[in-house]
Image (tube, helix red, strand yellow):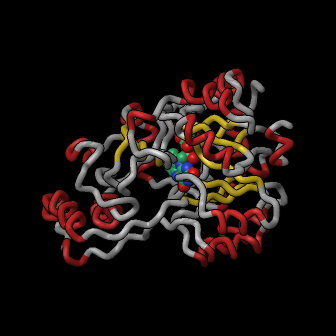
């Protein structure tokens, strides 16, 4: 069976779920354009999740994907939080921010029983996970209405693990990919390899279809991934300038600038390695800091710096998530971009 048959879509193009920079509008546009639109739920509370799912259900009858993180929330460490705030103290002083008054930032929530219940009301055709899979119990509840289950693998071992745990499709997430590394069996960054090194090895290692992700940004990239055995692609960065995305002004400006040529994996913004455009904070603290609290707790202390800088038009403290290939970003409707991506297959 082709990916299109498995997922009930016309084109083997999945719009990558991208928490914080898109909601229902992008998902609807891509699904109505023949690809698979995705709604990222990692940063949505139950009310926002419900209203976004209602918006999608109202605006498309086509299949769509609902995406969740499935990390185990860490126990907060006051010592680590204090070390992290100390590292940021010079910036608080420079921007006139009262460090004692910093509230907890909106976190990134893992898939839980409440989300599973809510999801069962909408019965989406596809559910995807990042950072592995939820508990067996939660996964069984998700399977109740028969959605296809997808998850990202960043190594051959992770792909085998996902297949053994029953996913319908493995997403091979290469090192070039924007946003968080989906890694979950190891936190050793040296285990991470590029898309075109990872993809053929995963294709050989598993029987389920494999979707390629990471730096695929135009029709030739899609064709190349398919030539290496991909059943389809998951494209994130290229959609970030579409009018239906909610990408911030500073993020859009960075993606359109020369700065987009230089990305790094950084844990400064959330505590987990994620790829974004190198900006002032990444440059000055270095992309990986041992002081950053465990995912997702690092986000709280940096949030007020981000807000203050962004209000003055600066992305110095913002997570400017991007893959290594922003050359395919276009300010065109997402349906049009989806068709362009599929032009050579
Ligand atoms: C801005 C941004 C946010 C992302 N957020 C998520 C997310 O919420 N869930 C997820 O599964 N993947 C997320 N990703 C990773 C994508 O699923 C995918 O691996 C990546 O976009 C592919 O590489 P590309 O950006 O080079 O196309 C995000 C990527 C970006 C660029």
Residue lying at the far front in this picture: please name it.
164
**Residue 278 showing in the rendered view:** yes
Displayed quadrant of residue 300? bottom left
Q: Tell how many labels.
A: 0
The spot of residue 153 in percent (x, y) is: 57, 42
Residue 108, given in percent of the width and then of the height, sits at 47, 65
Q: Is residue 3 above or below residue 83?
A: above
Q: Can residue 258 be seen in this view?
A: no
Q: Residue at x 41, y 48 (%)?
A: 320
Q: With 43 as the anchor, is 133 left or right in this view?
A: right
Q: For this view, does 266 lie left or right of residue 235?
A: left
Instruction: Name the image quarter holding the N terminus.
Output: top right
Left or right of 135 in this view: 271: left
Viewer-nearest residue: 76 or 241: 76
Tell whether 144 sits left or right of 225. Answer: right
Residue at 68 percent across and 39 percent down: it is 337
Q: Quadrant of the C terminus?
A: top right
Give the quadrant of residue 270: bottom left
Residue located 61% across and 55% down the image: 129
Q: Where is residue 321 in the image (x, y as percent from the top left)?
A: 44, 47
Establish if 26 lies above or below 219.
below
Foreground of the two, 336 or 106: 106
Q: Which residue is drawn at 80% across and 45% down?
A: 34
Give residue 309's position: percent from left, percent from top.
Answer: 29, 59
């Amino acid at each position: 069976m082709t990916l299109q048959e498995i997922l009930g879509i016309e084109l083997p193009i999945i719009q990558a779920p991208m928490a914080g920079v898109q909601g229902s509008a992008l998902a609807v546009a891509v699904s109505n354009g023949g690809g698979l639109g995705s709604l990222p739920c990692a940063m949505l509370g139950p009310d926002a999740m419900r209203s976004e799912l209602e918006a999608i259900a109202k605006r498309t009858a086509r299949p769509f994907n609902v995406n969740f993180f499935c990390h185990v929330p860490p126990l907060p460490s006051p010592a680590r939080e204090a070390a992290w705030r100390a590292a940021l103290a010079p910036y608080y002083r420079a921007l006139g921010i009262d460090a004692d008054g910093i509230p907890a930032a909106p976190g990134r929530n893992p898939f839980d029983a409440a989300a599973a219940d809510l999801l069962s009301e909408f019965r989406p055709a596809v559910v995807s996970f990042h950072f592995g899979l939820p508990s067996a119990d939660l996964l069984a509840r998700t399977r109740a209405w028969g959605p296809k289950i997808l998850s990202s693998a960043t190594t051959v071992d992770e792909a085998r693990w996902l297949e053994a745990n029953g996913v319908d499709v493995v997403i091979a997430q290469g090192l070039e990919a924007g946003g968080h590394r989906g890694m979950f069996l190891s936190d050793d960054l040296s285990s991470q390899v590029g898309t075109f090194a990872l993809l053929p090895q995963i294709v050989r290692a598993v029987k389920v279809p494999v979707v390629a992700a990471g730096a695929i940004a135009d029709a030739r990239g899609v064709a190349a991934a398919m030539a290496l055995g991909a059943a389809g692609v998951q494209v994130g960065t290229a959609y970030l300038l579409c009018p239906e995305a909610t990408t911030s002004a500073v993020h859009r400006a960075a993606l359109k600038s020369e700065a987009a040529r230089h990305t790094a994996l950084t844990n400064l913004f959330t505590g987990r390695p994620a790829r974004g455009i190198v900006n002032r904070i990444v440059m000055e603290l270095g992309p990986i800091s041992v002081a950053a609290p465990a995912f997702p707790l690092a986000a709280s202390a940096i949030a007020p710096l981000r807000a203050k800088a962004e209000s003055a038009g600066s992305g110095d403290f913002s997570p400017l998530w991007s893959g290594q290939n922003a050359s395919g970003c276009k300010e065109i409707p997402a349906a049009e971009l989806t068709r362009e991506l599929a032009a050579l297959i």
